[in-house]
Every structure is written in C-alpha cells, then in structure tokens.
Image: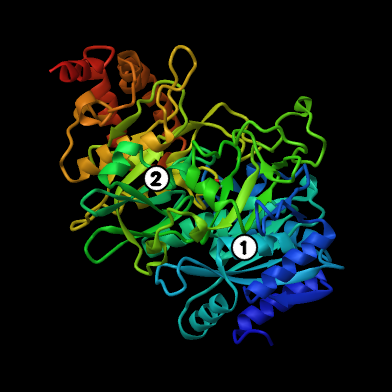
Amino acid sequence: MPSKLDSLNRWVDDVAKRTNPDRIHWCDGSDTEYRQLVDGMLKTGDLIELNQQTHPRCYLHRSDPRDVARVEKLTVICTRNRDDAGPNNNWMDPAAAHAKIDALFEGCMRGRTMYVIPYCMGPLGSPLSRCGVEITDSPYVVANMRLMTRMGTAALERIEREGLTQNGMFIKALHSIGELDPERRWIMHFPEELTIKSFGSGYGGNALLGKKCHALRIGSWQARSEGWLAEHMLIVGIENPQREIRYVAAAFPSACGKTNLAMLIPPEGYRREGWKVWTVGDDICWMRPGKDGRLYAINPEAGYFGVAPGTSKKTNPNALAMLQHDTIFTNVAVTEDNQPWWEGLDDRTPAKDWQGRDYDPANGPAAHPNSRFTVRANQCPSWSPEAENDQGVPIDAIVFGGRRAARVPLVFEARDWTHGVLVGASMASETTAAATDVGVAIRRDPMAMKPFCGYNFGDYFAHWLSFDQPGAKLPMVFHVNWFRKGKNGKFLWPGFGDNMRVLEWMLKRVTGEAGAVETPIGNLPRGKDLNLEGLGLGDGALDELFRVDNREWREEETAIGEYLAGYGSHLPGKLKAEWQRIVDALDAAAEPAATPERKAAAAS
Ligand code: OXD
Ligand code: MN
C-alpha cells in the first residue's frame, strides 16, 4: 500500500471503487513529476505554451467558458443541525448531500488518472499548519496545488505521523471535473466529517480544495473548536527606517486589492527613508494567540492565485516581476508573439482572447475579468522569509475594507476589540467578478468571509469576541476604503503604493506616535496626522475622502442593524450593544457632517 496510514489507504480505495479510474498516481511533489504533468497537458491541449523567450516555463490554460469563477449558489455546508451552518450559508443535510454528490462521482474517472495529493497548509513543521489529501482527476489541479501548497512526500509523512501518533486527522478532499457541466456541479463541505466533495468544476476555489474549501470553510470550523482564527486576509510586514518590522493582516473581499496591498512598493520618499514592505500572504491568514497574548499568523498557502486584469507596472510591479517565469495563467489573452496579456497590463493589442478567438472588442474583454495567475509565493521580489516561520508572525493591526464609492471614509480606527469586531461584521462591498452569481450591487460581507465562513456568522462573531481575554494583547482594528469616488465619478485616492501613507498612520497609532480625532464611527486621522507630501490632493478631495456624514451613517447603521438581526439568537448581545452605542452616538451628534473637527485641526 502506498501509505503507512490505513485510514488513508482505505479512503483512496473506496474512492477508486466508486470513480473507476484507469490509474492511480500518488503525487510526490517533485520537479520531475511537475514536468511530466506539464508535458502531458501540453500534449492534450490542457496547457498551451506561452512565449518561452520572454516567459520561460509559463503556460496558459483556457477553462471551459461555463467554468470561470467560484459559484456560490452551488457551494454548500452540510451539518447535522441546519442552524450550525447559519443563514450565511447554503445548507444540506449530510446524508442527502452525500447521496446527491456520490451519484455524480459514480464511474466519473473512467479513462482518467486519479491523482492523490497529500498537502500541508502552512509550513511543514508548524504547529499552526493543517494537512489534507486531495483526490482529483485533473492534472491542471495537481499542477496548481503544487504551486499553491506544500504538496507531496513531506506532507504525506506529516499526515502519517499525525495519523499514527495523535488524534491528528487530515481533511479528505475529493474532486472531479466531471463533465464541467454547470447543471451537474456541487462544492460540498462536511465540517463535522472533515470532508470536502467537489464535482463539475475545474476552476480556482471550486477545485483547488486546499484554498477556500479547506483553509477557510473547514478551517474556520476547526479554528472555532481549537481556539484560533481562519481568515480571508493578506499578511504584510512593514519595515520602518529603524529596521523594525510590524505585521498587518487585512481582509478585503475577493478582487478588491489584497494582492496589490500585500506586494506594495512604497512611494519614492518612503523608500529613500528606508521603508520596505514584506509579503507574507495575499489571501488567507491563520492566527492564534501566542504565550505573550499577541496573535501570531501564518499564511497557509505557498503560492498566489491572483486576479490578472489590472495588474501592471504601475499597480503592482512586484507581481509583474514574479509573473515573468514559472507561472500558469488561466483565461488571459495572448499577444501576437504569444505573451500573456490582460486589460490594464499595457497598451498592446492582444491577438487572441481568453477563449482563443481572434480578438474582437465586440466580444467583450480580451482576458476574462476573473482570469488568474498561479505562481509560487517565493517568486515575489517582496516575499518574506518569515512566511516559512513555524511560529508565525505577530500581528499588530487588522484592517477591514470594502469597495465603496460613497459614504465610507478613507480610513478609520475602531476604539477597541469589540468595536473592531462590529466594524468587521458590518463590512460591505460592491460585488466583483470573482464570483459569477452574486447579483447585487453592494452586499454585506463580514470580515470578507461571506463566501467562506463554514459556520453560522452569529457564532463566528462570538468566536471573534472571545479573543478579548485578560492578558490578551490584541491587534488594533482599522477600516479602509480605497475606492471612494468624487462627484466627477473618479476615485479620490490614488491607492496602490500610496496606501503606504495609511499603513504608516495605522502603525504609528499602534505605537502611539500618531494622532486622530474621535467621531461616532471611530477615530479618523486629521490632515496633519497623515503624510500626504507630494500627493497633490486638492482640499476638496481631502475633505471628501475623510467626510463622515452622520445622517448617511445613521442609514448605514440601520441597514447594518437589520442585517445583523438576521442572525437571531446567535448574534452575541455584546455586538448588539456595541451597535446600539454607535447608533446613540450618531443620534447625539448635533451636526449632520463630522468634517468640522478635521477642518479645524488642519487649520490649526
Ligand atoms: C480568491 C477569491 O480566489 O477570493 O482568492 O475568490
Ligand atoms: Mn480570496
């Protein structure tokens, strides 16, 4: 038998009996194996070679056009008790769900190879890491898992060690692309059984099961029972001119700039002074309290599965640099000389669109709006070696944010942890192309976890609140909105590298070096608190960026209150009381707009 662990062998056997593959391949994670997989896919057309002079070992995958993003309506949490999944999730009874999806798996791998992928989420030696085994019939998934996780023999050894010695249990993650038929597609999670079953999609989070399914949905469930947090957050280290590095974790919904913030290059003046940014992770963060009361975080992933459109020399030069070699692109366009191309990259005209058709603007964007790159994390020039630290990195600030054209100021600070949890729970954002079926303009997306929390959000908020223990040294909590627009419909804030100015303020709040003014919704920087040198923002833009309109916010809080009430008896009383405190403060605020403090302070 290929593994020392009977339970693993038995599961692989059972799956093979059901799915009937021609061959079973246990993945070792070696370079040779990767090369063979790529060669095989080049032969079948699953991969297309890109220009090897400009982009060595870079390939393009064109997905089925009906399979281009996560599908939230087919994503299900299956728990014995419906209430445990909560109103934030689609729910199915586990027995009914197994029956439904097992019928689809019946004989589905006939003529195919079944790949067994042992993987570890997080550094191989870290006590914070967790392991799983994905079984799939897609070599594209195997190649992506190799870039995105620590996969192969070393992971299997850890799984065997844990399985044989402790009650350590690996996640069983079963996947088949089936026929890629959207009518025969499900992404099912059984957190009580540490099991995932996904059928009918080969795309991203639907198919690379270590990512959203394991590291977030099942991860959040495990995290609650074990006293940690599994979050949809980037992790970034900010080094100041004194060579001190402080770490920030930030939760933004999909396709709202987590990758760009994680790889930010500070503005010229900052670089001259010695500021540097270190990338630990761009999408997922697992955090747990250390002995000293601080939260320590690891990035469970080993690669980036990032959105390509919009990535350019201006928006994210680090990402562009890392995408020049050893990258798998999915659903991007290509230029005449076969280089990968997407909207926002540069002003070249592509030759073929994401479906391989001759480019015709009448067909829409050349690259699919949710086209992606998959690349090993350490290819990023700003990659932090601390990403391999078994103990994780200490987090000083947690940032929540959304894409909001109106109402929400550039940045504000929560007054304490409880308020911070409310700020996270109240998050909302305009929807993006990362999920195809959401269909609303602005949706509530608590902690950016709406599509990813594996249990009832009411219980999740309670879990967050529970970290506020005597002796805890919790991070400060902030909210940002890079996307506020002026009357002319243009973004007010330049974003990207200039977001460093906001990060600097946050970290100086942590150390007590920067000031702020209190408002009913939280503490805001005044003009003098933020380094805006060289930005050339007019007073009008500045005022609008920081404007807090109490009447608008009263409306916002009403909507938040209604949303939170949807969690009924699961909603923690403490969170409700905190919401009431903000509402009372807004009602008590005399003037309709709260900018006068800012103006007065800026003038002084
Ligand atoms: C992602 C997502 O792919 O959030 O990271 O959709
Ligand atoms: Mn994500």
Rendered location of residue 415, percent (x, y) = 23, 37
Rendered location of residue 598, percent (x, y) = 21, 20
Rendered location of residue 508, percent (x, y) = 21, 41
Q: Could you say which disc has been placed on residue 584 in the image?
A: none
Residue for badge 1: 145
Q: Residue 76, can we see it? A: no
Q: Residue at x 37, y 34 (%)?
A: 498
Residue found at the very far right of the displayed protein: 111
Image quadrant in which you'd find residue 154: bottom right
Q: Residue at x 43, y 57 (%)?
A: 383
Instruction: Kindly indicate whether the residue at mark 2 contacts the one at mark 1 (C-beta within 8 angstroms).
Output: no
Rendered position, 194 above or below 513: below
Q: Residue 556, can we see it? A: yes
Q: Amino acid at mark 1?
A: Met
Left or right of 445 on screen, residue 115:
right
Residue for badge 2: 250
Q: Specify few, some or many for label 1: CA neighbours under 10 Å numbering under 14, 14-19, or 20 or more.
A: many
Q: Quadrant of the C terminus?
A: top left
The earlier-in-sequence mark between 1 and 2 is 1
Q: Front-most of 141 and 214?
A: 141
Q: Is mark 1 within 8 Å of ligand 1?
A: no
Rendered location of residue 310, percent (x, y) = 57, 36
Image quadrant in which you'd find residue 576: top left
State the separation of the CA atoms marked 1 and 2: 24 Å
Q: Specify few, some or many for label 2: CA neighbours under 10 Å numbering under 14, 14-19, or 20 or more.
A: many
Q: Amino acid at mark 2?
A: Ala
Rendered position, 593 above or below 79: above
